[in-house]
Amino acid sequence: MIRLLIALVCLIPSLAHARQGEAPAHSPTAVVVAPPTITLLDPGEEPRQALRFRIAPDLRQSVQFRMVMTTSMSMSGAEAPETRMPAVVMTMNVAVKSVADDGDVNYEMTVADAKVESGPGDPEELVKALRESIKPVKGLRGVCTVSNRGITRSASIDMPGDAANPAAMQGFREQLDQAMFPLPEEPIGKGARWTVESNGVTQAIRLKQKTTYTLTDVQGDTASFDVVVEQTAGEQEIKSPDMPPGASVTLRSLNSEGKGSIETALTRLIPQRSQVKLKSVMDAVIGQGGLGMGMKQTTTVEVQITDASAGDPSSAHDKPADPGK
């Protein structure tokens, strides 16, 4: 779920470029990636149960994502001042279309709103530019099918400019897999630990991610988890349509680590509350005109997710799911 919001923000330059002259592509495009590898490390305490999502066929959720990003950079040893970007806030509407007998859920996700929250000291020009560039994210739509263990079966994405930037679409689809968190097949109890490993693309970088979940509490359909995230990427050429002609970027290494927590009901697709802080360090070489310059960038991302529809009597997510699903 964290990589999902990061992917949305990373898509802003590509989508903005599409608005300025490229013909938008409105046909949903399907992309298939390998499922994650889930490994149970510790089944936890007794009593144990096989946790499964039990989603009602008329579930509706409105979820708010809030992200704050801070970056610092050095170029060939010269340090640049740390930059704190204004907070980006997005509202995502989720609507279930159908629930199969085996528990597979087909749902639609739409970015209903995207805005920038400025604070004291934020440069006015930066805020204005970010608000303008984030506009194309509004209306982005995806249709997904996930299992009752939270594993994505299929997904299709409909977004402006996706035909002109298939790499961006591929990256977003892979982040969409992270909207839910996969559950182990085996029965588990309090204290259970498992890992979810996957390969993905973020900002045109091919990386490996390992997420470790710990079940800290479970009461009926409500569960809480601690989360530890690790990301790594080896040396590779970074290819992006947004780079100027003749420019090149060679990644030397990327290492990210973070932690957070999740509170959710197994009758919801997206958690009720979640917060994660992730720190990434990237070492790269930027080439232009036959010359190379070393760059080291440190990025810290803090993401909060809140189910804005919780407690809304008109929302079906508070209704019990059919126990036969």
Image (cartoon, helix red, strand yellow):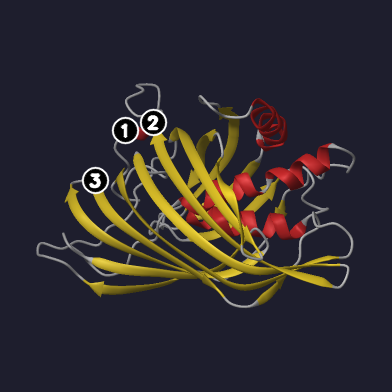
Q: Which residue is tagged 1?
A: 319
Q: Residue furthest top?
A: 313
Q: Which residue is tagged 2?
A: 316
Quarter of the figure with residue 185: bottom left
Q: Residue furthest left?
A: 46
Distance, label 2 to label 3, CA atoms, is 15 Å
In the foreground, 267 or 86: 86
Place of residue 282 in the rendered image (x, y in percent of width and height, measured from the top left)? 57, 65
How packed mark 2 is, by other alpha carbons closer than 10 Å (few <14, some 14-19, many 20 or more), is: many
Q: Which residue is tagged 3?
A: 221
Pointer 2 with pointer 1, Cβ within 8 A? yes
**Image height of 16 relative to 75, above or below:** above
Distance, label 2 to label 1, CA atoms, is 5 Å
**Comes first in the chain, label 2 or label 3:** 3
Place of residue 239 in the rendered image (x, y in percent of width and height, measured from the top left)? 76, 66
Check disc 1 and give the amino acid type.
Lys
Quarter of the figure with residue 259: bottom left
Residue drawn at 33 percent across, 43 percent down:
267
